[in-house]
Image (cartoon, coloured by chain):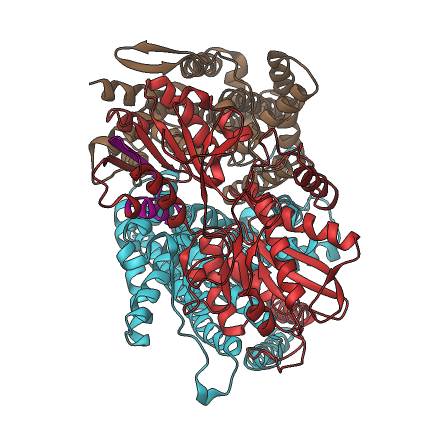
Chain colours: A cyan, B red, C brown
Amino acid sequence: MAQAAGLKNNKWVRLAGILIVVVLLAVAPLILPEFANQTVARIGVFAVAVLGLNVVMGYTGQVSLGQIFFVGVGAYVTAYGVNNDWNIVLVFLLAILIPGIAGLLVALAAARLGGLAIAMVTIALPIVGVPLAKRLSEFTGGSQGTSARFSDAPEWTGLFDDQWQLYIVIVIGAATFLLTRNLVRGKYGRAFGIVKSNEAVASSMGISPYRYKVLAFTIASLIGGVAGFLYMVVVQYTSPETMSFGHSITLLASMVIGGAGSIIGSLLGGAYYVLAPQLTNLIDPNLTAALQGAILLLILFVLPGGLVSLPRLWRRKRRGARPGDPAQTGTVPTSPPPAPQNTQSEERGT
Amino acid sequence: MSTLRKKARITSVVAGIGIVAVLAAGCSRGGGGGDSSDGPADASPGITDTSITLGITTPLSGATAGPGTCTVAGITAYFGAKNAEGGIEFGDGKTREVKINALDDAYDPQKALANFQQLEGEAFLMTSGLGTPTNRAYREAAIADEVPQVLIQTGDPIFSNTEESPWQLGFVPIYQNEGAAFGELLASSTEDHKVAILSQNDDYGEGYVEGFKEAIEGADNIEIVDELTYEATDTDVNAQLTELAATDADVFFNAMSITPLVISSLLKTQELGWLPSWFLPSNTSSPGAILTPGNAVAFPGIYTVAFAQSASAPTFAESEEGAAFLSNLAEYADYPDVPAFPHCVWSYQIGATLEQVFAKMTEPTRDDFMEQLRTIKGFTAPLMLEGASIDTTEDGQPAISGVTVQKYNGKGYATAETFG
Amino acid sequence: MGTFVQLVIDGLSAGSIYAALALAIVLVNQATGLINFAQGGMAVLSAYIAYAFLQLGLPLIVAILAAIVASFALGAFIERFLMRRFERGEPDTAIVVTVGLLTLITGICGWIWSYNNLQFPSLFPLDSINFLGAVVSVRSIGTTLVIIGIMLLLQLLFLRTKLGLALRAVASNPQSASFSGLPVGRLLMAGWGLAAVLGAVAGALIAPQLTLTPGMMDTALVYALAAVILGGMSSPIGVVIAAWAIGILENLAAVYVPFIGYDLKIAVPFILIFVVLILRPQGLFGRKDVVRV
């Protein structure tokens, strides 16, 4: 009986929650000031990028340090298409497909290698990508980069540019998030999870680790392409610096800070990527590096599972520290702690 | 338990969105989006009767933080001193205090755009930022929002083309001009020369080489024997130097902007036994920071182009202007060392140039500023070389178009009339 | 021929720089199982500490030794109070913590000493000698010899000493190590401390050439990681040889393979890694990792 009541609460609360979110998203661009809209739009761009990284790293456990490369390629394809006056829908599709194909090719080659090796191969992508972008200056505009203004609000909408751009980001971003959420909640998500935790078990169950790694990587690069398109919508300029290796590392950090293996964590990760530099600039522009490092360490120290684990921490603190509670910290772990493993898998289906 | 969990999750999502919305709403702007409310007499943002705010987005962290910090320090020192004397007198009769709001963009174009979007509501104009991609990132936004992006520290020619960039103006000479100045000097030489080129693989290096090549076109006493590039992130350029040394050229044209690489190149070339005459660009030719550690006296000649005095030359601190500059830098900009980068002096000169424009402004609007900006001619900013001056009236040229070719004399630089 | 020899020698000298950092990374990995992205940053901080001692008037050797002692303490401190919390958790989180540490250290160095290029005196004289028609600086020879020395010491440490064995035991199975009576906590701190010492030596060797700036080791770090993967995570000799190979082949590819040229020569280490790992997943000299399923 309590169960039935619980389910009923669940359904109404969930519907109400979703409705609130939808209304917020529809109305927010119209009432927020311009800078807020622009910031939220940028958060959306990098949330999508982190989402892609989460698919291959958070859910499937493969280290990828090359996500920003696919974002950069998506942005360059968008810029090229727009500057050559191609149909915008075609540009959007190409901006997704071309990085996707690149990701597929890389994955086919790299997925056979072990963990750290994949990391190195993915590091190669942005590191070689930057000089390559400079070399292919016919397509990319070389080291001066290329501008592409195409996301000004059309006359018939009566919107300001920043509102229009935010709507584009919201619509495309939300669609990407929903599709990915369905993916990771379904059988593919479960397969990813098994491949992450134990490849031998996966193959003994008939799940080919190689095939699912390739799939995860390709999906990550497709999503990266979407992020690249959105990047051009919001920033309207790209250059080789867009895909520099430092950004790849920051994306990785954002993913972990938001919460690896979590859809909402990707959103929080995108927020961290955009807001941390702005916040540290407000505190002291001369100390941005030190402050960002300190913020990152502080967040991870308090929440090793990322920002998304804040409700869980809250709940644990409210329940109080009971004997045997795995939330004890600061001691040298001499026994294998089972809790982190379990709670991670608890959150996996988010 | 799953109900509580989902409820908590949704609550935290909604709360999270709420927090973001509140935070974002907290940074509200006066005025609507997109349109700049500039009537003829309405003041633009960032200026009041008693103060004016300048915005800077420049790298204050990361690999280019050295020059980047200088781009803020110089202008802060200049206006710090002026504010202490009471402020700047504007053409409309009001005396205003100059405030500077500088943000770090870590040489990331996306962050530069974000900084611009944050500053455009509270700053009157954007200035002194370092870097081509960072300035390019918000160039179109500045044009659309009619915000001046002026006297910026990049030699990219697009910023000085009034048709393409009506709200922009570069400060430092375009890279092509610097390369061409040396090319002209070399072309006028009476002897034959073989030139080896090493340039940074970006618009900076390409610009220098382009200007140089244009200037020596048709000069049949000059032959380019080899041309190589390097990446700004390289730890050494020994392989390139080895290859170039094998050509035994007598002139080495360098477009390098990385200090340690220039020093190690100077040393390595000596080791290899190759002793050509060098050309160095204006931002990596500091006697104290580069030529002395690099033992540059071993070479027959080190040439550079300049329009400003070098802060690390021994005579600089002894001159009145130089001493004032160094003390202002220490007092108002929290920069106690002798600058190793020329950007500190350049940024100081940007401040002086802006003061000239402010003195001509009759209305507190961005439109009027841009109009007056283009009327400065023959202004000798502090710390300029003899004969150099600021001229903003020429379309297609930045505020400083002419450069002097100089030769290292073991301690500092002296003007070079001819090569050799 | 002269050019070829010169390129090889310069490649060796560049490779020694990468090797210095790679050895520190290997040590941390063997002792604690982590990849420390902040290794280069810690090395830079050590070099700055030596610089600070120099400014106080100490002679160069003393300043470097003082920095070495300080680095050991710093490394141990970081392990105990920062990394300890993350060592048994998700490896991705631990990596990101080291990234945050790198950002923090770089920022602190920039704050205290500014981002200007500082001159750091060289331990070796500035002469050069001729060798097989090529010129090599005494500084490069000195650096390479010191690296070889460290490499041999590390190899000895891991394979022949009780300390090395204890460190590796703690890294591979902390529970058993603890049950065997090993002081796990102190060994972890020692591992990080020793790695920081290595980093300090690397920083002092490299700073004269690269000039001291907060980001001095950033590019070298990528090459060092490549060398570690190529050479095998468990073999000091392997990573040094890998680092040399990367330095030499990079130079040769840039000059003799026009398609690659100087701008894409950074692809060479990765192509190498790819080829080697397909044939030998544990790296050139690494031991195969057997994991119980």
Q: What residue lies at 68% left-to-right and 71% top-to-bottom?
A: B22
Quarter of the view holding residue B250 = top left
Quarter of the view holding residue B200 = top left
**Is residue A216 left or right of A33 when viewed as pictured?**
left
Q: What residue lies at 76% left-to-right and 55% top-to-bottom?
A: B83
Q: Is residue A111 visible?
A: no
Q: Is residue B221 above or below residue B357?
A: above
The extreme bottom residue here reads: A156
Q: Which residues are magenta?
A: B189-213
Q: Is residue A197 above or below residue B13?
A: above
Front-most of residues B77 and C143? B77
Q: Is residue A81 above or below residue C281?
A: below
Residue C88 shown in magenta: no
> Number of marks in the image?
0
Q: Quadrant of the N terminus of chain B?
A: bottom right
Residue B201 shown in magenta: yes
